[in-house]
Image (spheres, rainbow, N blue to C red):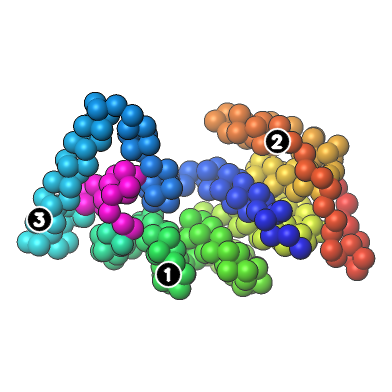
Amino acid sequence: MSQPRNRWIVRIILALAVAAFVGVSVIPIISAINNPSPLNQNATSTDTRVQSSDQISKLQDEVRGYELVLQREPENQTALNGLLQARLQLLSLKQGDVQGVIEPLEKLAQLNPQQSEYGVLLAQAKQQLGDQEGAAQAYRSILATKPGDLKALQGIVALLLEQQRPEAAVGLLEDTLSKADQGNKIQPGTVDTVAIQVLLGTVHASQMRYPQATSVYDQAIKQDPQDFRPVLAKAMLFREQGKVEEAKPLFDSAVALAPAQYKDEINRAAATPTPAPTPTPTQSSETPSED
């Protein structure tokens, strides 16, 4: 089984079919680290170097100012947010380190338990530092009070797959789905079962368990025929297996069902070159599911 061969499924469906399409928007810590500012990359002229240096100096002054405020008022959220933003911008300019964002994020997550974005960002930062247990703990802290939080579920599932623990990811998602009805009765709309089913199918797909993945996607499609996410996930899964003709109408259906702002993204996904067919390891013992 080739993990790199199937990473596209995890990357695209976790990020595109779940996160982007449910409106997840968090400060891009990983992006700030991995995508340095063009000012830093293209410092080919004196003016550009001066501009970059001035920007860094200004941000460092802002950091010192926020730190002084926080010495007097440790829970000043305006200062905490300002410090976080300034340090993230410095990271994008390859200044400072990820450790610098941990403290303000921990404080903000503690002060705003209802806003899971801070906890997710904290988990991302810890993961970037190699603290996988700390990242998992940050995700679990969110899920302890908000078991259906998609941002936390997406993050911990991706972390578990990175750790080569797909069964733990499957167990977590199945347990979440088993409690979804009860949670939605208490507080309607708190658990997006279709999105969680897409996540579950994606975990199976990442392990080349194609019949199981197809079955989960089909359940999600049956549950909400107007939701394009499982349709798109199934289309991408079929194309991964070389089932180009079966995938095409699914892509068309996903485009038709999706809100206007996502149609171009789906069309781009549909236009991605078709990979060679991948054999299904379980084919000899299982009967492939029907379209």
Q: Which residue is mark 2?
A: 272
Q: Is residue 218 left or right of residue 26?
A: right
Amino acid type of the residue tagged 1 in the rendering: Asp
Q: Is residue 1 above or below residue 22?
A: below
Q: Is residue 90 magenta?
A: yes
Nearest the viewer among 58 and 171 is 58
Q: How many other residues sit within 10 Å of disc 1, few (<14), some (14-19) or many (≥20)?
A: some
Nearest the viewer among 174 and 288 is 288
Amino acid type of the residue tagged 3 in the rendering: Val
Q: Which stretch appears magenta?
A: 82-98
Q: Nearer the viewer, mark 1 or mark 3?
A: 1
Q: Which residue is mark 1?
A: 131
Quadrant housing the N terminus: bottom right
- Secondary structure at numbered mark 3: helix
Q: Nearer the viewer, mark 2 or mark 3?
A: 2
Q: How many other residues sit within 10 Å of disc 3, few (<14), some (14-19) or many (≥20)?
A: some
